[in-house]
Image (cartoon, rainbow, N blue to C red):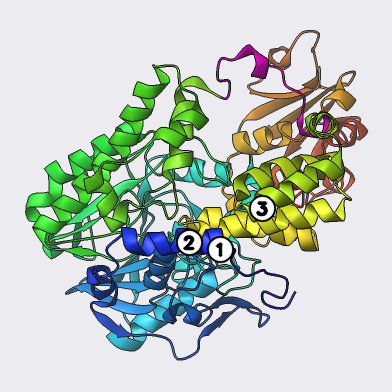
């Protein structure tokens, strides 16, 4: 698709709404732009970051169009935020602390020590991380990496690690620090529900959309995700408690653990020697997600707000600058305290007011429509819903406490989407009548209703070209009016796929390094998720693995469930198991290769050092009951 070839202009209703945004907020306040440019030292000469094969994984100039005035096809507030996020290069935060910004979705922070540098959060992929480090060295000299720190367990904060350090350097004493539980959460999130998350992330980040005023302009948190090689080196030092202090290369760090905030495993870091506070992703220049649109476990805004209070109590008195793994820093103690307290109040308000309203009997969607931020919070640019939103965050709080069911028995056992759609369309007089009325609603600017009602026609008849086109047009207009970057991307991706077909999954975090970091427990769990239950109801297969130098693991497929138990008693795998159908003694590396699908049962039996007792064919039979996830599943069509 050529850039924006099939995109429409903004309708008058969207133009008027976007003009109202310009009148509503203080666009003449340029402090954020000044802060985003403060300390700029330079950027890369080559705008393209490529992989080993020459493929482009990041383009620094892709968002140059944001220098222009905001068009009618973008919410001016989101355009402003994207303009700020597109500033790229090396920036001095304070003497000895530097950030490379705009080289990926996240920032890479570099702290200078006695001999070399500490690298914090090495971006998504090795290629962008290497380019970021090269930019730093071009300005500050060839300092070696003497430590790496992951602030939390999301891929944009560890995936580029092999671009800044090697396994040999880590084995030779370069520490890799991370919060307690980092590795478990980093790998499980990208494997258990990884296929679905990655497919939905294609909508959330819009990496496949053309960049431009009618296409992808950013995500609010950063511009988009790079598409290079995701890597992972397991941590060597674990931070297990708040106030824990570590010194590497002369750099003293005092940690605050913040589990259950923006990530299940996360921490903030104070650098006493620099009077600097790293807030990871717990306080950034936007309202963050309590439940990401790509999918995740619901985060806890109550503890999130409390950890922000604790950060002020612990570190504010000795902090002159606060920076994060996204966006730009905040300078000055008073401004830092104001920033952190407003962020704290933001999450606390959403939590407390959602609870107040749900206890009055309101449902998630009703609360989302009623929720308004206090004027003082709404006036602050950094509380705007560029990445998370008030609407979907209040629904997340509702889900955290009450789940998917709103208590109305009429919605307890609804028909699934396709069957509901067929009945709705029939009730409404058929597809032709629905589309006639929807076109009228479109002309009136009620794009939410058009998307909702025409979506029924598409699900009832996915080949209805008129319905697909009209829904695409409505989604596009909704995108043009969205202040939230991920909402815009979702709407425009939906329009793109309705018009052009699925784009699949442009990026995936389940890389070889991530898979290699799974524990055996997690590997067996990942197989259990893939059992095709109904096809396996009558199967009863038991396999015993004896790992040389390790544990004995008995795996059993029975009742459509794959269980695994550690120990020497096969009966622990269930009733009527005296001996496994097949026993296999092998090295852990061979077991991992088998479970990851890179080594077939027949090839396993032929490997040196592998001993098989019983019928190896039973292992092949068991593996035959596993299905493969679909990274290209439909989203806007049935």
Q: CA distance from mark 2 to mark 1?
A: 6 Å
Residue 225 x, y percent position in the rendering: 54, 64
The outermost residue toward the left is 317
User: Closer to the N terminus: mark 1 or mark 3?
Assistant: 1
Q: Is residue 604 left or right of residue 250?
A: right
Image point (87%, 47%), residue name: 606
Compared across the picture, whether 59 is left or right of 278 comes to: right
Answer with left or right where residue 178 lies relative to residue 585: left
Q: CA distance from mark 2 to mark 3?
A: 15 Å
Q: Which residues are magenta?
A: 404-419
Name the spot of residue 359 as percent of width and height, x first: 39, 17
From the viewer's side, name the closer residue of 67 and 284. 67
Is residue 412 magenta-colored? Answer: yes
Q: Is residue 106 visible?
A: no
Residue holding disc 1 = 12
Instruction: Quickly name the residue at label 3.
Output: 442
Residue under label 2, please give it.
16
Residue drawn at point x = 87 percent, y = 50 percent:
464
The C terminus lies in quadrant: top right
- Eyeballing the image, is 17 above or below 265? below
Which quarter of the image is occupied by the N terminus?
bottom right
């Amino acid at each position: 698709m050529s850039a924006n070839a099939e995109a429409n202009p903004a309708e008058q209703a969207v133009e008027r709404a976007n003009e109202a945004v310009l009148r509503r907020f203080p666009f003449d306040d340029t402090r954020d732009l000044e802060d985003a440019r403060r300390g700029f030292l330079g950027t890369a000469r080559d705008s393209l970051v490529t992989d080993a094969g020459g493929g482009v994984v990041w383009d620094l100039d892709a968002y140059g169009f944001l220098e222009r005035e905001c068009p009618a096809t973008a919410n001016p507030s989101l355009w402003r935020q994207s303009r700020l996020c597109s500033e790229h290069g090396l920036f001095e935060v304070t003497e000895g602390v530097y950030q490379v910004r705009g080289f990926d979705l996240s920032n890479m922070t570099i702290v200078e020590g006695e001999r070399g540098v500490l690298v914090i959060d090495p971006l998504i992929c090795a290629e962008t991380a290497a380019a970021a480090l090269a930019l730093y060295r071009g300005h500050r000299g060839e300092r070696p990496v003497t430590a790496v720190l992951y602030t939390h367990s999301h891929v944009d904060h560890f995936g580029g690690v092999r671009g800044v350090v090697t396994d040999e350097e880590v084995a030779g004493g370069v520490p890799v620090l991370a919060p307690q539980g980092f590795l478990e959460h980093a790998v499980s999130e990208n494997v258990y529900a990884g296929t679905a998350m990655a497919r939905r992330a294609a909508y959330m980040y819009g990496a496949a959309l053309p960049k431009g005023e009618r296409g992808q302009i950013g995500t609010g948190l950063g511009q988009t995700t790079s598409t290079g090689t995701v890597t992972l080196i397991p941590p060597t030092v674990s931070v297990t408690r708040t106030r824990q202090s570590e010194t590497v290369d002369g750099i003293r760090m005092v940690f605050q653990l913040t589990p259950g905030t923006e990530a299940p495993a996360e921490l903030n870091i104070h650098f006493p020697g620099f009077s600097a506070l790293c807030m990871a992703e717990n306080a950034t220049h936007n309202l963050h997600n309590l439940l990401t649109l790509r999918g995740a476990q619901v985060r806890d805004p109550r503890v999130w707000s409390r950890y922000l209070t604790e950060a002020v109590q612990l570190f504010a008195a000795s902090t002159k600058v606060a920076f994060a793994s996204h966006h730009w820093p905040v300078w000055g103690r008073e401004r830092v305290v104001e920033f952190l307290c407003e962020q704290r109040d933001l999450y606390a308000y959403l939590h407390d007011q959602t609870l107040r309203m749900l206890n009055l009997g309101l449902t998630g969607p009703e609360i989302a429509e009623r929720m308004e931020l206090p004027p003082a919070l709404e006036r602050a640019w950094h509380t705007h819903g560029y990445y998370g939103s008030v609407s979907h965050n209040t629904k997340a709080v509702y889900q955290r406490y009450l789940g998917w069911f709103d208590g109305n028995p009429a919605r307890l056992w609804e028909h699934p989407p396709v069957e509901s759609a067929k009945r709705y369309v029939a009730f409404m007089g058929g597809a032709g009548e629905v589309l006639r009325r929807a076109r009228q609603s479109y002309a009136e600017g009620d794009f939410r209703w058009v998307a909702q009602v025409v979506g029924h026609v598409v699900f009832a008849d996915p080949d209805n070209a008129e319905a697909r086109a009209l829904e695409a047009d409505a989604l596009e207009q909704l995108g043009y009016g969205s202040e939230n970057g991920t909402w815009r991307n979702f709407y425009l991706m939906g329009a793109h796929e309705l018009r052009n077909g699925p784009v699949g999954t442009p990026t995936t975090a389940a890389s070889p390094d991530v898979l290699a970091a799974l524990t055996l427990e997690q590997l067996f769990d990942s197989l259990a998720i893939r059992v095709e239950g109904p096809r396996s109801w009558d199967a009863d297969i038991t396999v015993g693995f004896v790992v040389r130098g390790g544990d004995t693991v008995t795996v059993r497929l029975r009742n459509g469930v794959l269980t695994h138990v550690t120990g020497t008693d096969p009966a622990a795998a269930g009733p009527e198991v005296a001996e496994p159908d097949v026993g296999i003694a092998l090295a852990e590396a061979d077991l991992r290769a088998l479970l990851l699908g890179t080594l077939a049962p027949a090839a396993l039996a032929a490997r040196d050092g592998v001993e098989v007792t019983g019928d190896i064919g039973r292992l092949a039979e068991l593996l035959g009951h596993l299905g493969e996830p679909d990274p290209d599943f439909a989203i806007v069509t049935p």
